[in-house]
């Protein structure tokens, strides 16, 4: 399978995970206006590209605006969250693989081990 099916992530937020590589993975995330990706942290580095829309990220308690065509780096371990200022879409890349996301999205343990 090349792409995972769309899944509800949070209210007003859906995502699909693209088939991962050996040490990097990507997912596309769509937001309704005003929807939030709740604050969290993980040890993985994250690079986020804004496909469309306007967003406000909070990284370590500080605001970081992001608009179409812009990229944002989130270091591993940094507490972060996002709010959609208008409907939009993001493309997230993580390294190393986020086995937690893969498993919660239906990838089997064997698939996660194989990649």
Image (spheres, rainbow, N blue to C red):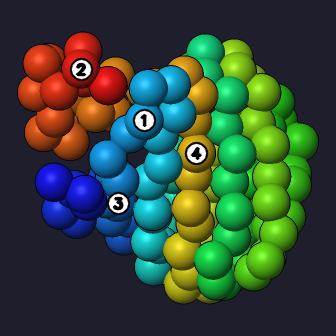
Element at label 4: strand
Element at label 2: helix
Residue in view at x 61 percent, y 15 percent: 43
x%, y% of residue 51? 63, 77
x%, y% of residue 77? 69, 17
Tag of residue 21: 1
The residue that disc 3 covers is 15
| Disc 4 from disc 1: Cα separation | 11 Å
Quadrant placement of the N terminus? bottom left
The residue that disc 4 covers is 93
The residue that disc 2 covers is 114
Foreground disc of the pair 2, 4: 2
Foreground disc of the pair 1, 3: 1
Quadrant placement of the C terminus? top left
Q: Return the disc, 1 or 2, that comes first in the chain's sequence.
A: 1
Q: In this rendering, would 27 be left or right of 81?
A: left
| 10 Å crowding of disc 3: few (<14), some (14-19), many (20+) | many
| 10 Å crowding of disc 4: few (<14), some (14-19), many (20+) | many
Q: Which of the 4 image quarters holds residue 100?
A: top left
Q: Are the residues tagged 2 and 3 within 8 Å (C-beta)?
A: no
x%, y% of residue 12? 36, 70
**Front-most of residues 92 and 23:** 23
| Disc 4 from disc 3: Cα separation | 13 Å
């Amino acid at each position: 399978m090349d792409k995972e099916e769309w899944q509800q992530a949070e209210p007003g937020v859906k995502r699909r995970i693209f088939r991962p590589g050996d040490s990097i993975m990507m997912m596309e995330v769509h937001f309704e206006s005003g929807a939030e990706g709740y604050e969290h942290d993980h040890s993985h580095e994250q690079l986020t590209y804004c496909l469309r829309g306007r967003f406000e990220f909070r990284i370590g308690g500080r605001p970081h605006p992001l608009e179409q065509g812009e990229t944002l780096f989130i270091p591993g371990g940094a507490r972060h969250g996002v709010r959609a200022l208008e409907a939009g879409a993001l493309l997230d890349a993580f390294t190393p693989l986020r086995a937690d996301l893969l498993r919660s999205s239906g990838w089997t343990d064997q698939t996660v081990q194989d990649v």
